[in-house]
Image (cartoon, rainbow, N blue to C red):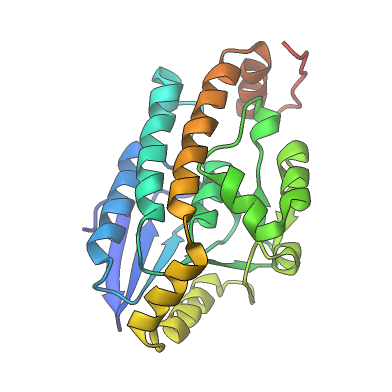
Amino acid sequence: MSSAELSVTVTDEVGLLEMTRPPANHIDESLLGRLVDAAVELDGKCRVLVLASTGRHFCAGADLGEGDFVRDRAAAAAGLYRHGKRLFGVRTPIVAAVQGSAVGGGLGLACAADFRVAEASTRFVANFARLGFHQGFGLSVTLPELVGRQFATDMLLTARRVGGEEAVRVGLADRLAAPGRVRDTALELAGQIAASAPLAVRSIRGTLRGDLVERVGAALDHELAEQRVLWATRDSAEGIEASLERRTPAFLGE
């Protein structure tokens, strides 16, 4: 299951899925597909999965400056969301070890996990409005469920950075690790879950999640439809261009 950009190891019934596309660990259909394939393969064989990455950042979302998202943005997003829906269908609990930044689709990936471990320097960013388009990766469902509708609206409309300490306070992260110990702390949490009765864990998790997979699936369809409309606007072109050029965007409402 391992590849040049994904490392998969299993230790004591805990599966570690590690993206190795540093420093930003941008996701595309290929990488996310391999990650989800590995998660599906280990589903039922491991008691817990840990999602991690090498490099400075957990995941900066999709690379809007090259690759699939330049050639056909809507098709690229549809591919990501297809795999994202599969990830939500995995029955094994998932812990995300979030160092650096989780931005855009990277935030969506982190929120697809059951738990997030951060450190004080971690940054969670829903930057979609500053790029001129609608949020994706199921964040319309997952983010409000984690932090409440009002705080989610704040994050989505302002695109501000939420640090690790604030993230723990509001429920966006579940553990605050010491500097440099995000992965170790995530593995410790995974070990605690793995020590519980596996059939009971799955039963409890299934009850609490309820119809989450169905709701996320509907949200993904809606998010993509909204994104298709907004990607055709001048504001979105300006937002993406400004992001790539590292300058403040000038939006006109067009």
Q: Image quarter for residue 79? A: top left
* In front of the other: 23 or 107: 107
Q: Position of residue 112 (x, y in %)?
A: 49, 55
Horizontal side of 192 relative to 17 (left or right) equals: right
Q: Residue at x 56, y 75 (%)?
A: 181
Up/down of 210 relative to 246, above or below: below
Can residue 215 be seen here?
Answer: yes
Q: Residue at x 73, y 40 (%)?
A: 159
Up/down of 253 relative to 167, above or below: above
Q: Position of residue 4 (x, y in %)?
A: 27, 51
* In front of the other: 132 or 4: 132
Q: Position of residue 32 (x, y in %)?
A: 36, 46
Q: Residue at x 63, y 66 (%)?
A: 173
Up/down of 223 relative to 31, above or below: above
Q: Image quarter for residue 200? A: bottom left
Q: Residue at x 37, y 87 (%)?
A: 197
